Amino acid sequence: MTRKKAYLIAMALLMTLLTVLLCAAAIRIWREGSARKAENPLEAVYTPEKVEEELLRISPLLYAVIGMAAAGLLLGIRDEKNARPSPAPDAARKQRQETKDGRSPRTGEQPSDRGTNAVRIALLLAAGALMVLGAMNGSMEDVLRKAINICTECIGLG
Amino acid sequence: MDKIKQETWWQRHRPSTRRLVQVYCALLYNAHLKGFVTGEIYRGPTKAACVPGLNCYSCPGAVGACPLGALQNALAASGHRAGWYVLGILLLFGVTLGRTVCGWLCPFGWIQELLHRIPTPKIRKSAVTRTLSWMKYIVLAVFVIILPLVYGLAYDLPLPAFCKYICPAGTLEGAMGLLPTNRDFFSMLGILFTRKYVIMLIIGLACVFCYRSFCRFLCPLGAIYGLFNRFSIVGVRVDPTRCNRCGACVRHCEMDIRRVGDHECISCGRCMAHCGTGAISIRAGKITLKGPEIRGRDTASETAPEDARKRKTLGRALWGAALAVLCFALVWFNVLDPSAAERAGDQRSGEAGSIEARTGEASREAAGPAGTGPEVSRHAKEERAGDTETPAEPEKKWESDAPVGYEVGQRLEDFTARCLDGRTFHLAEHRGKIVFINLWATWCTPCVQELPYFNALYQGKGDVAVLAIHSPAVTDDPAAFLAGKGYAFPFATEAEAERLFAIVHGGAVLPQTIVLNRSGEVVYNKVGSVTPETLEALYAAADAGI
């Protein structure tokens, strides 16, 4: 095993471990907090102190991962296998075969320009009309009102 | 070989034009940088416009709306109003750009590519990933369209299901963006956050190993734009007269395409460097934006150097204009924006309201017995204005000498609110009762879900007063929304909302609950949803004088 390969595998393991530990920390805080909340409904499940405590515990691994990733990026270490082409999907293989056999391929033909332009113009006009309709019926105002107020559960605060 | 050795580190690692455009867009969409410091989201008029990519509008820096969030909310409200505007915006972005948005203009796409740069073994595309790429259409159908529609039409419950249960951009940009500067939000975190946080971490890890995992397998916005890829004006195009069907473009592409320009193609243009015949270019209609390359060489500049020079000059001019726009946006949204000055003024008047009330309280105390201070004269003014209902004098044993304000331990400023059912709610009349004030909105799912809890509390206990105040941001008529729901407690009219929100320090985050003890002192004033158990505990705490 080359050093590059060992580095890549080590990074993969560290990244996975970091993710697992972060998930475990969140689940642990939630479980302990839920138990406290079951006894006293006014208790918070998550507290800043608990979150900071867990982050502090994981921080050495986090810094190690950041440091190793930065070093790898600076040194240009990468999975060389990834730079090689993937096997072609069935459709592309068929096309190549048809070309080799002298048959004209069924796929890959462009729609006619005139037809495409007509569709584009129709869709653009429809888009404009819908936006004007939306401004008139108040749905644009709805977008604004929703965007300037946070619904907490929509961003996971709940 | 020698040529490769002569390349400097910078030449090997120089960011591509596409990377620069991605960074530019991420900055432009989140130009309200001071929001990351103040912990407040931007609330100006530009949020009526959707940005093309996935960028949560609850990110403190966001200056535009997220098209996916807007679509779900529009579908959830389709019983009240058709969401033509959002459909028009999506159609516009789809027809003009298609999935070029994903490859060039989406901040979350950029984040995924950055994660993929972390040096680890990588999972290449295969038949499995190609099959998984259809999953995003299922996510689109179920979480973005069906669930919001069903809950909105059948239950009148706004449910942006993708935002609520899956979207990692919301967790990363919204929650992670707001939590460090709003420590009181921690009390709102629960199972929903835990689930979304774990999902975000898993998606992040997947992106490290597998190129653009979220984009390929889960993103409903990419699914929508992919439907337009065939017709989009801007995108990667293959010249059929030059293409020899070798398939090199497909084999080198990291997305699950079957041919360049299909619904999985994000028009990143990386296939251009692998095309042996120069058949691939990025075009906007008939205009070539990036000419064909043969094995990494821009052949257009070799065959038509004059055109190449013109393109270079035009490119520089466009970059100059773009940077000017970005600089203006950064200055505007962080310094000059008049809507920010208005909000600061609102905040100051809210504080002044508290200060005036405190001053009134002080002068009332100085004047002697109750009935001579400005608060009474305010009531007298209301009488002269025609409001014939006057509040009863509070019982002397429930009087409080705490300072007037909205924080815990302070006495909430007395107010009178007209209600939807014709009643008038006088706070002073409810001394001796535990008072629950709930800030809600028809478009807020947890707000609507917890109204029955307040109703049960109000009907179950004889010494509880409840008042619900709708957010000043009204999208649907609250009276029509509440008709037939049978809530017994009063709801303040929309006309009262701004004034009452200022008194209780309500803001952009909902729901919010304020609890007053029998002396009118605040014992609880927090954002976040409540459960029946929480309400019982709050009642007990207020009753005990805690």
Image: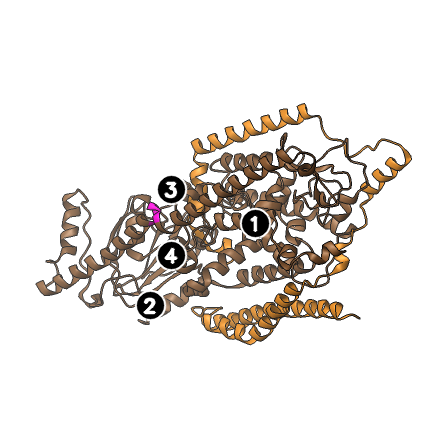
Discs 4/3, front: 3
Residue B222 position by quadrant: top right
Residue placed under numbered mark 4 in the picture: B459
Residue B87 spot, x, y in % from top left: 54, 36
Q: Amino acid at mark 3?
A: Ala
Discs 4/2, front: 2
Q: Residues within 10 Å of mark 2 (few under 14, many from 20)?
A: many
Residue placed under numbered mark 3 in the picture: B479
Q: Amino acid at mark 1?
A: Leu
Q: Residues within 10 Å of mark 3 (few under 14, many from 20)?
A: some
Alpha carbon separation for disc pair 4 and 2: 18 Å
A150 within the magenta span: no
Q: Nearer the viewer, residue A19 or A136?
A: A19
Which of the chains bears the disc numbered 2? B
> Where, quadrant-wise, is the N terminus of chain A in this rendering?
bottom right
Alpha carbon separation for disc pair 2 and 1: 56 Å
Q: Which region is colored magenta?
A: B336-340
Left-right relation of A140 to B521 = right
Q: Earlier in the sequence, mark 2 or mark 3?
A: 3
Mostly what secondary structure, the magenta segment?
helix
Residue placed under numbered mark 1 in the picture: B20
- Element class at badge 2: helix
Residue B184 spot, x, y in % from top left: 41, 64
The tag on residue B542 is 2
Residues flagged by tags 1 and 4 on a common chain:
yes
Residue B527, relative to residue A35: is it above or below? Answer: above
Residues flagged by tags 4 and 3 on a common chain:
yes
